[in-house]
Image: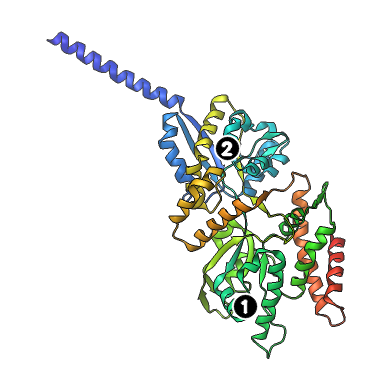
């Protein structure tokens, strides 16, 4: 009896040792992959929530564990990636994956440090993505930036204020679908608000603010069938002048917001009632307007697709970072790809983006999952935004900027110079001796060109 008991105890001990060995083996074979991303905060992020789900399911089954080591903004990631790529001794080591724009990759001394996703996604898998989203991530003929969540430009409207204007003047919101209609309405709004106080001359309000003057011209000129860029410079062709005329006219008449800062701010203070901005800025629009006299008003903010020119293509800017994977070992690279394929699954990707205010990246997501997701949303502003997304994806072509070395420099100088030129033109037009507005529009354009 003692003999059999000894045998049994020995057997149980061997089982325990085997189990412990297996556990240690699992721990040793666990692949830890690190990520820098931009979605939310370190403790409050829809992406972090999904990563936890991955780690507890597919990750656990495949001995993969994703750890977020930084949640920051794209500019910080850009600086840290380049510092590491150029060998700055004070730079943090690169993670296995990081969120980035293609401009970061283009600025790296050697982009072959990054995985070419074409080695891990077959043609059928890549064809599931929106084609323009994939194309944007190709740098030097290699797919190095995988789309994860995208934004675009949309029109946000203070519908409460707009309805008062429409009731009084008979304008219709459908007129905002074209740039020509929007700018004509902008001038009418400034006139109408000026008429409200006949005892005060010239106090008409601004109607419209554009977050990205550069994008208005860039996308607009391309949509009108002309190249905006000539090599590493801006072309300034006939279609640029066509886009300039209504834009400048509205500015000179006081209908276009020319101050610095984001478009969300003048809508929040009632200084404007219509904006075009990144769809991701929905997070910062408020349904409470606080006027200059400190009175407040509850308003309804709605979103519509970005306006286009009457005779132009329906073209709209696509925005948003993608994910880069740093080359390492086949096992680590495959672990990263396993996670990314899981995260870009159409249904799961829709779940992620609708919590973060972005667009999904696959055609199936728009066709099958986005509408049910919209029906589950409770915030009217988000419901309006995602309906605008559906219409945009259906009717528009997404545009992304060319990968030229001078792009960031051109964008920065253009944004500053165009505001200054329009302010200069407006002050000149206010001078009684400046001549007609048509003359001043041309003079302001010439002044702007001389600044660039």
> In terms of image quadrants, where is residue 106?
top right
CA separation in Å, label 2 and label 1: 53 Å
Q: Is label 2 in a helix, a strand or a loop?
A: strand
Q: Do the numbered discs 2 and 1 sit on residues whose CB atoms are within 8 Å? A: no
* Label 1 Cα crowd, 10 Å radius (few <14 / some 14-19 / many 20+): few
Q: Quadrant of the C terminus?
A: bottom right
Give the vertical position of 107 relative to 448 (above or below): above
Q: In the image, which disc is placed on residue 97?
A: 2
> 201 or 413, which is in the foreground?
201
Q: Position of residue 451 (x, y in %)?
A: 85, 61
Give the vertical position of 439 relative to 307 (above or below): below
Give the color scheme: rainbow, by chain, secondary structure or one colour.
rainbow
Left or right of 450 in this view: 208: left
Q: Quadrant of the N terminus?
A: top left
Left or right of 13 in this view: 28: right
Q: In the rendered image, which residue does mark 1 sit on?
A: 170
Dot in front, 2 or 1: 1
**Which residue of the protein is positioned furthest toward the bottom in this rendering?**
199
> 149 or 3, which is in the foreground?
149
**Which residue of the protein is positioned furthest toward the top in this rendering?**
3
Q: Position of residue 120 (x, y in %)?
A: 58, 29
* Label 2 Cα crowd, 10 Å radius (few <14 / some 14-19 / many 20+): many
* Residue 178 visible at all: yes
> In terms of image quadrants, where is residue 55?
top left
* Residue 93 visible at all: no
Left or right of 433 in this view: 204: left
Q: Is label 1 in a helix, a strand or a loop?
A: loop
**Which residue occupies 80% across, 62% down?**
242
Along the polypeptide, which appears first: circle 2 or circle 1?
2
Q: Position of residue 133 (x, y in %)?
A: 63, 43
Give the vertical position of 162 relative to 108 (above or below): below
**Which residue occupies 24% across, 17% down?**
12
């Amino acid at each position: 009896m003692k003999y059999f008991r000894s045998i049994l105890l020995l057997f149980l001990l061997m089982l325990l040792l085997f189990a412990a060995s297996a556990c240690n083996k699992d721990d040793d074979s666990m692949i830890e992959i690190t990520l820098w991303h931009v979605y939310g905060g370190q403790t409050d992020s829809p992406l972090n929530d999904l990563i936890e789900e991955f780690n507890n399911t597919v990750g656990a089954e495949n001995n993969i564990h994703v750890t977020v080591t930084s949640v920051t903004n794209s500019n910080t990631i850009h600086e840290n990636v380049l510092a590491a790529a150029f060998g700055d001794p004070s730079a943090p080591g690169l993670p296995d994956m990081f969120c980035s724009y293609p401009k970061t990759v283009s600025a790296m001394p050697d982009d072959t440090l990054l995985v070419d996703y074409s080695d891990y996604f077959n043609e059928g898998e890549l064809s599931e993505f929106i084609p323009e989203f994939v194309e944007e991530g190709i740098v030097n003929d290699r797919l190095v930036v995988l789309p994860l969540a995208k934004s675009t430009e949309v029109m946000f409207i203070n519908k409460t204020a707009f309805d008062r204007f429409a009731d009084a003047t008979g304008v219709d919101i459908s007129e905002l679908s074209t740039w020509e209609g929007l700018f004509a309405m902008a001038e009418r709004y400034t006139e109408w608000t000026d008429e409200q106080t006949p005892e005060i001359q010239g106090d008409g309000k601004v109607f419209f603010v554009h977050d990205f003057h550069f994008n208005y011209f860039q996308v607009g000129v391309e949509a009108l069938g002309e190249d905006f860029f000539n090599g590493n410079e801006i072309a300034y062709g006939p279609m640029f002048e066509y886009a300039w005329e209504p834009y400048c006219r509205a500015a000179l008449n006081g209908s276009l917001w020319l101050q610095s800062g984001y478009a969300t701010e003048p809508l929040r203070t009632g200084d404007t009632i219509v904006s075009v901005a990144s769809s991701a800025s929905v997070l910062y629009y408020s349904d409470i307007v606080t006027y200059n006299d400190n009175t407040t008003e509850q308003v309804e903010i709605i979103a519509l697709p970005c306006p286009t020119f009457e005779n132009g293509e329906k073209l709209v800017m696509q925005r948003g970072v993608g994910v880069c994977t740093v080359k390492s070992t086949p096992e680590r690279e495959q672990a990263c790809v396993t996670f990314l394929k899981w995260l870009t699954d159409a249904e799961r990707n829709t779940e992620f983006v609708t919590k973060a205010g972005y667009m999904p990246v696959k055609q199936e997501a728009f066709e099958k999952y986005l509408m049910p997701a919209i029906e589950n949303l409770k915030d009217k502003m988000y419901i309006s935004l995602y309906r605008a997304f559906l219409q945009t994806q259906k009717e528009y072509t997404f545009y992304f900027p060319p990968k030229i070395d001078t792009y960031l420099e051109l964008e920065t100088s253009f944004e500053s110079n165009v505001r200054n030129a329009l302010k200069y033109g407006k002050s000149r037009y206010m001078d009684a001796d400046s001549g007609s507005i048509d003359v001043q529009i041309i003079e302001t354009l010439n002044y702007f060109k001389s600044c660039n």
